[in-house]
Amino acid sequence: MEEFRLSSESRDGVAIVKAQGYLDVTTRGELDELLTDARREQNWVILDLTDVRFLDTSSVAVIVSHWKKLEARGGKLMLAGAQQRYIRALWITGLASRMSLYDDVEKAIAAAGSARTASSGD
């Protein structure tokens, strides 16, 4: 099994949380903690799923919880690099069509910058 890893950084006013390996019942607590920390730092959070090879429903629940909390305060949770073959749970539940998905982190950062600029100009 692939090694599970989480990391985070902040770039251009956006918190980026990178996950690697399997997101399941054994790792969801760590994911929840890191997303909580990211939400405390920024209203815009990118979850980089490029190197995730499995996502179970317990991890989907963690993602949805943070997505709702960010949306409630005018922020956004964006998913980058999500590969349908590995994280089918997002598509099966219909969340893939409701959440902001981007091919990679750079595209998500660009979209976040554009959206934040547009909303501050109102």
Image (cartoon, rainbow, N blue to C red):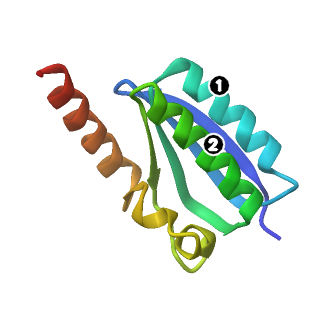
Q: Earlier in the sequence, mark 2 or mark 1?
A: 1
Q: Where is residue 37, by image quadrant?
A: top right
Q: Nearer the viewer, residue 104 or 39?
A: 39
Q: Where is residue 115, by image quadrant?
A: top left
The residue located at (78%, 49%) in the rendering is: 28
Within 10 Å of disc 2 (Cα), the crowding (few <14, some 14-19, many 20+) is few
Point out the residue furthest to the right here: 26
Point out the residue furthest to the front here: 72
The residue located at (19%, 20%) in the rendering is: 120
The answer to whether the residues at label 2 and label 1 have Cβ atoms under 8 Å apart is no
Residue type marked 2: Ser
State which quarter of the image contains the C terminus.
top left
Please tell me whether mark 1 sits on a helix, a strand or a loop: helix
Residue annotated with mark 2: 65
Q: Give the Cα separation between the discs numbered 2 and 1.
A: 14 Å
Query: Quick check: 19 left or right of 112?
Result: right
Q: What is the x, y in percent for residue 31?
A: 72, 43
**Mark in front: 2 vs 1:** 2
Residue annotated with mark 1: 37
Q: What is the x, y in percent for residue 9?
A: 53, 30
State which quarter of the image contains the N terminus.
bottom right
The residue located at (25%, 29%) in the rendering is: 116
